[in-house]
Image (cartoon, rainbow, N blue to C red):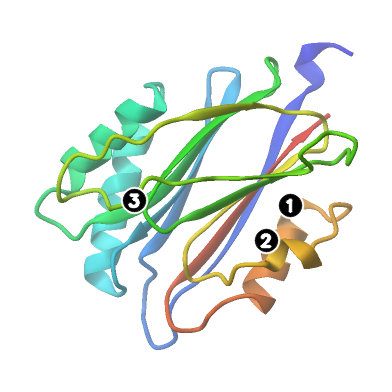
Amino acid sequence: MAAGHLKIDTAFATLPLPGQAESGDLCLIKRVGKGTLIAVVDGLGHGEEAASAAHAAVGSLDRYSREPLVDLVRRCHEAVVGLRGVVLGLAHLDPQAATMTWLGVGNVGGILLRADLGNRPSRITLLPSAGFIGAEQTHPTTRSVPLALGDTVILFSDGIKDGFAESLALSSTPQEIADHVITRHVKGNDDALVLVARYAR
């Protein structure tokens, strides 16, 4: 199979805190070279100030998207100094090399679900660094993991309840998974966002 036929399919769903006009949870999905950069950014708190910080961070990620993930965290820090802080989950998926590199800072979540349960472990969890971006420099560590066709990566903000992965059908499309999670697994006391990416033909 030619490498050119491999791709990353992505989708997301978001829900602001009831009563709020805009969400402080934002995401970025961007083609970078032959790979795809995905990010979930959660501005601390909710409302306009949280959204302003999240927009500044996402703008920085978009502008410097070709830089290594650790450098992107530093860029976000510079972008949100003086604003509310943010927490984030970042991943770069390279379909040709069949790898994903990811990191997290603060209370964001991420899971990689294996399409082939013969690949052990069948589920890998993102382990974010403590703290948040915007107060003092954080030094998160990246982790690279191999990808196989059909593997699904999910990044999500802390407005999503843990444990939703048990109810997912990997036969569903990324958009169906995102819609399912945002419909059935939000806490309801915060903005919520879920981003789904799949390594596909």
Task: Give the label on residue 70, or none.
Answer: none
Residue drawn at x 58%, y 72% is 161
Q: Earlier in the sequence, mark 2 or mark 3?
A: 3
Please tell me whether mark 1 sits on a helix, a strand or a loop.
helix
Residue drawn at x 36%, y 79% is 21
Q: Given the current orientation, which residue lies at the most extreme left position? A: 82
In the image, residue 50 sits, relative to residue 195, either above or below, namely below
Q: Which residue is mark 1?
A: 174
Q: Estimate the x, y position of residue 85 in percent, counting from the top left.
A: 22, 56
Q: Left or right of 7: which side holds 111?
A: left
Q: Estimate the x, y position of residue 112 in percent, counting from the top left.
A: 68, 44
Q: CA distance from mark 1 to mark 2?
A: 6 Å
Residue drawn at x 62%, y 71% is 182
Q: Which one is closest to the eye, mark 2 or mark 3?
A: 3
Q: Which image quarter holds the C terminus?
A: top right
Q: Which residue is mark 3?
A: 130
Q: Given the current orientation, which residue lies at the most extreme front position? A: 121
In the image, residue 22 sits, relative to residue 165, either above or below, namely below
Q: Which residue is mark 2?
A: 178
Q: Which image quarter holds the N terminus?
A: top right
Is mark 1 in CB contact (under 8 Å) with mark 2?
yes
Q: Residues within 10 Å of mark 3 (few under 14, many from 20)?
A: some
Q: Amino acid at mark 1?
A: Pro
